[in-house]
Amino acid sequence: MGKAHFLLSLECFWAQPELGVAHGESGRSDCSRAVPSAGGPSQACWILGLNLSYRGRFEEGLDMQARAAALAEALGDRRLASYAA
């Protein structure tokens, strides 16, 4: 489900960030228990962090960005690392 949450959250970011947060929060459990693997949960973490930060929920957003950065390091995924940064 992580990839679906990522895509919905990303799609909503520009026009409806409130929905982006809602979709991202639906996948929060995927992010917090994500096993290092490419794709869905890793990407869902960084877009949720971005949506949360955009809505003024900075501490939660930074927590998700840190999770995305940790996953990127575990995976050796430079693209995700750049997004998380």
Image (tube, helix red, strand yellow):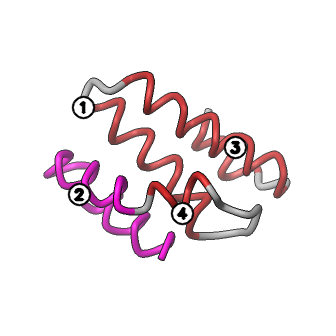
Mark 1 in CB contact with mark 2 (< 8 angstroms): no
Sequence-wise first label, 1 or 2 = 2
Coordinates of residue 17 in the picture (x, y in percent): 20, 46
Q: Which mark is residue 39?
A: none
Pointer 1: what residue? 55
Coordinates of residue 72 in the picture (x, y in percent): 74, 49
| Quadrant in which residue 33 is drawn | bottom right
| Separation of residues labelled 1 and 4 (CA atoms) | 21 Å
Local secondary structure at mark 2: helix
| Separation of residues labelled 4 and 2 (CA atoms) | 19 Å
Q: Which residue is drawn at 69% across and 43% down?
A: 81
Pointer 2: what residue? 12
Sequence-wise first label, 4 or 3 = 4
Amino acid found under the numbered disc labelled 4: Asp
Q: Which of 12 and 25 is in front in this view?
A: 25
Sequence-wise first label, 1 or 4 = 4
Q: Give the range drawn in magenta.
A: 1-26
Which of the two discs, 3 and 1, sits closer to the camera? 1
Pointer 3: what residue? 81
Sequence-wise first label, 3 or 1 = 1
Pointer 4: what residue? 30
